[in-house]
Image (tube, rainbow, N blue to C red):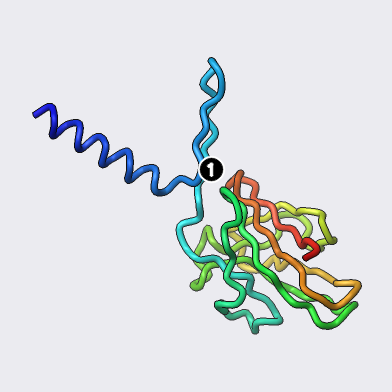
Amino acid sequence: MKHIFLALTVLLLSACSAQLSNVSVRGGNTTNSVVKSIDRPMFVRGDFTLWDAEAVYQMRETSAGVYQVRVKFTTPGKVYEFKIADASWTEGYNCGYAVDGKLALGEPKVADCQTVYNYFSFTPARKGVFIIQLDYRTPSQPLVSVLPN
């Protein structure tokens, strides 16, 4: 009986840890820091993709809770609009801006993943490849940035 209980405990713990990217315990006060991964593919979807979820714009987890994808913007001075969402525009996975959606290079903005509209906008000063990043380490306040490549 003891072996069955131990096996079930190990099984449950391993199943739980499969959903977590990073778990750390610090010092004597046992401050737990848990970063969860998003449980589905997320895409940058915008006017340059005709709002479709295209495989080339699928975000990849680059570190625990941080997702990125490279995007080529070909027209300097053009306002590009986009959101970060799953393939079905699912509530909770449909991220637009929370307060202000105008992105400047390297300056993160808080996202709201419950929005229907609220598109982010970015106006590149030069044509080229940029990185769009979703920092989901604090799910209650995810951050979206456009970074230089």
Residue farthest toward the top in the current orientation of the protein: 28
Q: Work out whether 96 lies above or below 17.
A: below
In the figure, residue 14 lies in which quadrant?
A: top left
- Return the residue at label 1: 35
Residue 47, horizontal then vertical, whole percent: 70, 80
Q: Tell me the quadrant of the picture where the N terminus can be found.
A: top left
Residue 5, horizontal then vertical, whole percent: 17, 31
Residue 16, horizontal then vertical, whole percent: 36, 43
Q: Amino acid at mark 1?
A: Val
Which SS class for mark 1?
A: strand
Q: Tell me the quadrant of the picture where the C terminus can be found.
A: bottom right
Residue 13, horizontal then vertical, whole percent: 32, 38
**Number of residue marks:** 1
Q: Work out whether 108 lies above or below 140.
A: below
Q: Work out whether 135 lies above or below 102.
A: above
Q: Work out whether 52 lies above or below 121.
A: below
Q: Residues within 10 Å of mark 1 (few under 14, many from 20)?
A: some
Residue visible at 55% across and 77% down in the picture: 55
Residue visible at 42% across and 48% down in the picture: 19
